[in-house]
Amino acid sequence: MNSDEIKTRLTKVFRDIFDTPALELRDDMTADDIEDWDSLTHVDLIVEVEKEFKIKLSTGEVRKMKNVGDFITLIGSKVS
Amino acid sequence: MNPNKTINLDYRRLVRISKGLDVSSHPQQIRIALLSDAATQQFVPVLKALLHENGIGASFYEGPFDAIELETINPASGLYQFKPDFVILLNATQALRSRYYSHGLEAEFERIPRTWNAIQSSSLCRVIQCNFPLPYERPFGQFDLKLQNSFYTAVQSLNSHLATLVKDQGNVLLCDLESVASDLGRRNWFDDRLWDMCKTFCALDHLPAAAQAMVDLVLASLGRVVKCVILDLDNTLWGGVVGDLGYAGVEIAAHGDGEAFYRFQQFLLSLKNRGILLAVCSKNDLSNAVAVFESNPNMVLKRADITVFMANWENKADNIRQIRDTLQIGFDSMVFLDDNPFERNLVRNFLPDVIVPELPEDPADYISAISSLNLFEVTAFSREDVARSALYKEEADRREAQNSFTDINEFLKSLEMRAAIARFQEEEITRIEQLFLRSNQFNLTTHRYSAAECRALMNNKQGCIPLQISLQDRFGAHGLISIVVAWPQADTLFISDWLMSCRVLGRGVEQYVMNHVFATARELGLKTVSGDYLPTAKNAMVKDFWQRFGFEHAGGTSWRRPVAAYQDIPVHITELAPELAAH
């Protein structure tokens, strides 16, 4: 799966979780850029991503993620 | 209760529903306070959405994280300012774990009931205490069970300790999260990563199951309980068609071909023994159908276990309407079980309030399918529950006797009725609470008092007169069948509550009680008796109640009648000393 494909599917998850159908993801996006992105929706996000990509993320991996770009890289390393 | 009991417990779906959800239009509004040593921000929207789907608008108070004791001990806390109807105490196994490893669990055995007592000394709300899903770690393997104080066995004993304690706490309900977790599987239930990241007490996917367990308790507390299970016969209660096979030929046996049906009947019998009425609704010739109950020795259910028996060729919706008329209970308190999808859909279509669960193809799966819906939640269990089927049977005998009289007065006289009116008594509190919860039709104000509130009325020192009325006749004892709560206020005796079981309609009980009410007002030197009628979807039966007793409309919902002009209404009921009121 290439990173564009991952981004498309990740966008779908983000739009659902944050309830914003027009949301467009950028690699440098962080929790500061999305209003409802707090520690709790973060967990919702992780769990949905795990389901969408059929992967499992560890607590450490989740902690290390700083922005959407890190998220895409991490997913890429798990699905390949 | 939600009649579409095939509940969809999808976490994301419920979160989406609750976003921006306005529940203020539901006629039934409740206030729930949630205190927890876990994070509850994800849980509350789920709870709110599930209650909404059951027609209940809930507003929430979420206590500060891990402040259960502080909130409950301080009478000025946010908890009490919120004035909750329910307090949910959600203690997480994960939080318990860290306390266990630092100083053991002994303190918990005292601490948890202490919070109940603290709440009850400041509020009359109901307390819902969650028990603890058992942890998966067992340092000694299976040998753990031989140890008194491994974490696993300590949680086990804490759970059974809580279960023992709540037996004497009518106002505390135990939410069996351990059973929910073990049903789903402990390994799926816990997600330790979520606990580490944000103190979520179980996997997100299972938050709805936890919430549903609490919703079931809330619904039962609000009086939404199943009172009757209506059963099809062929291929539901036994295998095969009795019209073809005869009473001896149908499949029903303790072993072999009919075992699934045998087991199902045992399950139904346990429901009947706990106070749920069983009725039959079957397309059959009556004599063929009855013959199986009377003559097939393998039947677990006997004819006497069935309160209403409808076997004919009319459509099932009409038959269920008749069952309702006979039993005088609402459609929404009935469950209809039928193996035939056509009949299920027909009943769903014509009687949308009746609860019609899907039944699996294989009768071996009936019990597990029905149990998974948790249809039979209840908050108390009283003598009347055990005797309920018998009470309805006596009622049928009375009706038969009635048919032999042409004059209703002669009939009433022949019943030799005796009634006892007394203040609320401690040993009847369970039944009193239940009557407040279960009475919908003959109920003038439909206040749903908890056991604690009933007890508060009983102990009220401000002049409150809380009356319980029991009745018996020559066919047997009806038990406690009516409640009236009266308050002397200035120059009037104000009736805040008047309700009666529909089983004793048309006997003159309300007339007998009204005579008593006016006598009381007169003794107290009060000038009038007054009361309210608060209409609900179900209590139209008493909309003319005050008028029929000569009360004048006094504006709004209230009615009033002077004491001076009142003359006792003749009745065929004599006084029974309260201590002789049969139990």
Image (cartoon, coloured by chain):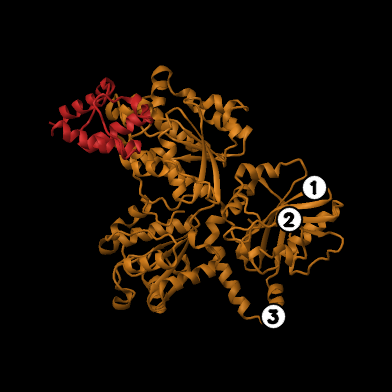
Chain colours: A red, B orange
User: The C terminus of chain A is located in which quarter?
Assistant: top left
Measured from the top left, where is residue B154 in percent x and y?
Answer: 40, 28
Disc 2 element: strand
Mark 3 vs mark 1: tell me if same chain.
yes
| Pointers 3 and 2 in contact (C-beta within 8 Å) | no
Amino acid at circle 2: Gly
Question: Can residue B294 be seen here?
Answer: no
- Judging by the rendered image, the residue that carries numbered circle 3 is B407
Residue B11 can be seen, yes or no: yes
- Residue B385: image quadrant is bottom right
Q: Which chain is indicated by disc 1?
A: B
The kind of secondary structure element at disc 3 is: loop
Q: Position of residue B322 (x, y in %)?
A: 50, 72
Disc 2: which residue: B531
| Above-or-below relation of B294 to B81 | below
Number of on-image labels: 3
Please tell me which of labels 3 and 2 falls first in the chain: 3
Q: From the viewer's side, name the closer residue of B423 and B386.
A: B423
The amino acid type, in three-letter code, at marker 1 is Gln
Give whichever of discs 2 and 1 has the lower sequence position: 1
- Residue at the spot 42% in from the left edge and 36% down from the top edge: B43
Q: Chain of mark 3?
A: B
The N terminus of chain A lies in quadrant:
top left
For disc 1, the neighbor class at 10 Å (few under 14, some 14 to 19, many from 20) is some
Specify the quadrant of the image occupied by residue B459.
Answer: top right
Residue for badge 1: B489
Q: Element type at marker 1?
A: strand
- Along the line of sight, which residue is nearer the eye, B10 or B164? B10
Give the CA distance from mark 3 to mark 2: 33 Å
Residue sticking out furthest to the top: B102
Q: Chain of mark 2?
A: B
- Same chain, marks 3 and 2? yes
